[in-house]
Image (tube, rainbow, N blue to C red):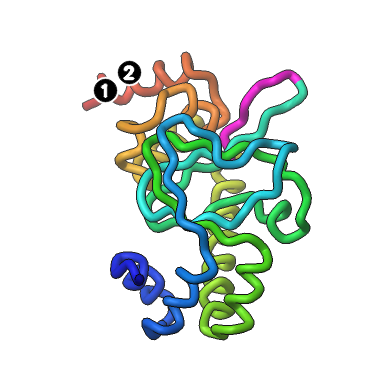
Amino acid sequence: MIHEDILENFRTYVPFTKEEVKDFFGKAKHVKYHKNEVLVEKDAQVSPFIFIRKGCLMTYYTDGKKFNHVIQFGLDKWWTGDLQSFMQGTPSNYTIKAMSDTEVWTLDKNGFEGLCADQPAFERYFRIIFQNSLVSHQKRIIRNISYSAEEKYLTFIKNYPRLELLIAQKYIASYLGITPEFLSMIRRKLANKS
């Protein structure tokens, strides 16, 4: 069975045939998670490569002081996972948690390699996905080292307009690298300007 919404999403990058995408559904595993359910536990398991059909996932790193640092949010039709863990078969450096009821398709390393070998169009597709991801992460690094907290927040709400409705303020603050109290100050300041 092929999900047309996923087929159309894949086709935004590569002109897949239905047969090529059918192989994806044969190799990937379909899983549903409830809000606050953990998909990947840090240091406990190898991360799969995760396609989010619908919902919201949060990837975070827990430091030695047990403080959680939000690395990224993943929304509908995005790929996520701990790429190092996935590629090297090592336990994940991150925890990945459902922030809403979420439906995903996951690929383990063997499924990924088999898909790319059996359907060469996926090799090109994943190259484009990885390139886009690298560009996105480089832009975030620049924002983190050169933007003010207010500029980071404004960029966040521009890039993720519906996330504030799904995610607690403390997670957004962590993603931005500021305290929840400072984020509240920024939001009040911006509300007063309006």
Q: Residue at x 49, y 30 (%)?
A: 149
Q: Is residue 15 visible?
A: no
Seen in the picture, residue 191 relative to 111 is either above or below; the reply is above
Q: Position of residue 123 (x, y in %)?
A: 58, 79
Q: Amino acid at mark 2?
A: Arg
Q: Residues within 10 Å of mark 2 (few under 14, many from 20)?
A: few
Q: Position of residue 182 (x, y in %)?
A: 48, 18
User: Are the residues tagged 1 and 2 within 8 Å (C-beta)?
Assistant: yes
Q: Residue at x 45, y 69 (%)?
A: 25
Q: Quadrant of residue 120?
A: bottom right
Q: Is residue 36 visible?
A: yes
Q: Is residue 177 left or right of residue 92?
A: left
User: What span is colored magenta in the figure?
Assistant: 65-71
Q: Is residue 18 left or right of residue 90?
A: left
Q: Is residue 8 left or right of residue 146?
A: left
- The image quadrant where one finds the N terminus is bottom left
- The image quadrant where one finds the C terminus is top left
Q: Residue at x 43, y 53 (%)?
A: 52
Q: Residues within 10 Å of mark 1 (few under 14, many from 20)?
A: few
Instruction: Tell whether position 69 is magenta.
Output: yes
Q: Amino acid at mark 1?
A: Ala
Instruction: Tell whether position 75 is magenta.
Output: no
Separation (CA) of disc 1 from disc 2: 5 Å
Q: Quadrant of residue 4?
A: bottom left
What number is the disc on residue 188?
Answer: 2
The residue where tag 1 is placed is 191
The front one of 185 and 109 is 109
Q: Secondary structure at mark 1?
A: helix
Seen in the picture, residue 185 relative to 91 is either above or below; the reply is above
